[in-house]
Amino acid sequence: LLAAVALMASSLLEKPSEAFTMTCACNSGAWDVYIIGKMGPGGVDYRTVYPGDVVAVVGRTGGSKNKVMKAVVVRMRKWRKNPLNNGFMESFDQNACVLIDKDGNPVGSKVNGPIHHRAMLRWPKIAAITTK
């Protein structure tokens, strides 16, 4: 019993070793990107990422080498409450993000697919270029 408790405690305290993949929902040239950290308050734990958050990602954009870039999460598979507090919860069939520059403007000119309401409210520039 003591060994089982120690095993559970060690698995909760260790940092995850793999970054998870997201699809790039904009037409900036990137396909799949890997989340390596979360920007802003709340630490760098990428397991606490929700739609509308800014994350650091690694991926290819037209060149042969990978680059570290910023992105806004627009779709998640996790269930998340609707920010309008109407009792609904939303989830999507894939994880997706939109690349942004250092000023917070989207790199691409078009975002494909739906985006979460929380991301729409926090990033109106991304919501303006969304095609449904």
Image (cartoon, rainbow, N blue to C red):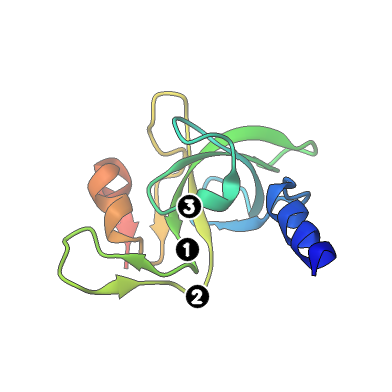
Amino acid type, callout 2: Asp
Amino acid type, callout 1: Met
Q: Earlier in the sequence, mark 2 or mark 3?
A: 3
Q: Residue at x 53, y 63 (%)?
A: 95
Q: Position of residue 34 (x, y in %)?
A: 67, 49
For residue 93, the mark is 2
- Residue 39's place in the image compared with 46, above or below, is above
Left or right of 13 in this view: 115? left
Q: Which residue in the rendered view is the most extreme toward the right?
A: 3
Q: Residue at x 79, y 36 (%)?
A: 65
User: Residue 31: which quarter of the image?
Assistant: bottom right
- Find disc 3 in the rendering and name its residue: 26
Q: Secondary structure at mark 1?
A: loop
Neighbours of disc 3 within 10 Å: few (<14), some (14-19), many (20+): many
Are dots 1 and 3 in contact, CB under 8 Å?
A: no
Residue depth check, mark 2 versus mark 3: number of the one nearer the observer:
2
User: Residue 5: which quarter of the image?
Assistant: bottom right
Q: Position of residue 54 (x, y in %)?
A: 46, 39
Q: Quadrant of the C terminus?
A: bottom left
- Residue 96's place in the image compared with 36, above or below, is below
Measured Cα–Cα span from mark 1 to mark 3: 15 Å
- Find disc 1 in the rendering and name its residue: 76
For residue 64, the mark is none
Q: Residue at x 27, y 59 (%)?
A: 117
Q: Residue at x 66, y 57 (%)?
A: 21
Neighbours of disc 1 within 10 Å: few (<14), some (14-19), many (20+): many
Q: Position of residue 116 (x, y in %)?
A: 33, 61
Q: Which one is nearer the viewer's eye here, 51 or 59?
A: 51
- Residue 117's place in the image compared with 13, above or below, is below
